[in-house]
Image: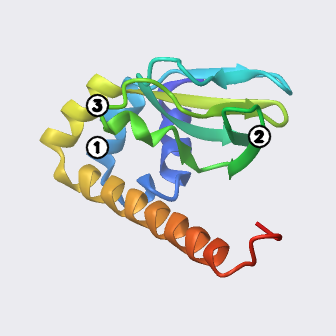
């Protein structure tokens, strides 16, 4: 995908659509695309958290595993969604979830070091990422609250 096509895709992201063209241009220059087939792993628990991902095409399941091997789908990313944002927490360092292509997918990779550098130079990008993280935190709190009101048997 050439630079102008990549720029169009970045503009379609719910998070990145708020950014000005200059920031998007910088992101487009440092964000390679990769294709994944149905069932392919994008990242797995224990992998180094070195990139944030923008899904351009397809869908991606985000799965967490319990110590006894039970799996829970914790997210479903569609075109325009970002995932893998915990890379912004350096203390974690490693992935805790599994990202699996639910169908053929095209994913744009945003390198952690370059992304953090760009956020330093472009506070607007940092603000949008904070909004994304706050929204996801609120969703997690809502889920915890809903579960806490269920009976022990239904949990």
* Residue at the spot 64% in from the left edge and 40% down from the top edge: 56
- Between 57 and 152, the one lying in front of the other is 152
> In the picture shown, does residue 113 fall above or below 57?
above
Q: Quadrant of residue 147?
A: bottom right
In this picture, residue 117 sits left or right of residue 38: left
* Residue at the spot 76% in from the left edge and 31% down from the top edge: 69
State the CA–CA distance, disc 2 to disc 1: 38 Å
From the image, tell me which residue sits under label 2.
71
Q: Is residue 1 visible?
A: yes
| Spot occupied by residue 43 in the image (x, y as percentages of width and height) | 61, 23
Q: Quadrant of residue 91?
A: top left
- Mark before the other along the chain sequence, 2 or 1: 1
> In the picture shown, does residue 27 fall above or below 131?
above
Dot in front, 1 or 3: 3
Q: Quadrant of the N terminus?
A: top right
From the image, tell me which residue sits under label 1.
23
State the CA–CA distance, disc 3 to disc 2: 25 Å
* Residue at the spot 82% in from the left edge and 70% down from the top edge: 153
| Spot occupied by residue 108 in the image (x, y as percentages of width and height) | 55, 30
Q: Is residue 77 visible?
A: no
Mark 2 crowd level (few <14, some 14–19, many ≥20, 10 Å Cα): few
From the image, tell me which residue sits under label 3.
90
Q: Which mark is residue 124?
A: none
User: The residue tagged with tag 1: helix, strand or loop?
Assistant: helix
- Mark before the other along the chain sequence, 3 or 2: 2
Dot in front, 3 or 2: 2
| Spot occupied by residue 4 in the image (x, y as percentages of width and height) | 49, 34
- Mark before the other along the chain sequence, 1 or 3: 1
| Spot occupied by residue 45 in the image (x, y as percentages of width and height) | 59, 24
């Amino acid at each position: 995908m050439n630079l102008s096509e990549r720029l169009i895709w970045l503009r379609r992201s719910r998070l990145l659509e708020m950014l000005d063209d200059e920031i998007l241009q910088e992101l487009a220059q440092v964000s390679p695309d990769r294709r994944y087939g149905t069932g392919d792993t994008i990242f797995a628990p224990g992998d180094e958290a070195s990139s944030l991902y923008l899904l351009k095409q397809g869908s991606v399941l985000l799965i967490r595993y319990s110590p006894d091997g039970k799996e829970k789908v914790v997210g479903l990313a569609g075109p325009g969604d970002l995932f893998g944002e915990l890379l912004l927490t350096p203390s974690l360092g490693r992935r805790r979830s599994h990202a699996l292509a639910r169908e053929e997918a095209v994913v744009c990779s945003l390198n952690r070091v370059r992304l953090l550098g760009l956020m330093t130079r472009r506070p607007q990008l940092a603000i949008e990422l904070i909004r994304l993280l706050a929204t996801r935190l609120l969703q997690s709190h809502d889920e915890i609250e809903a579960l806490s009101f269920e009976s022990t048997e239904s949990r």
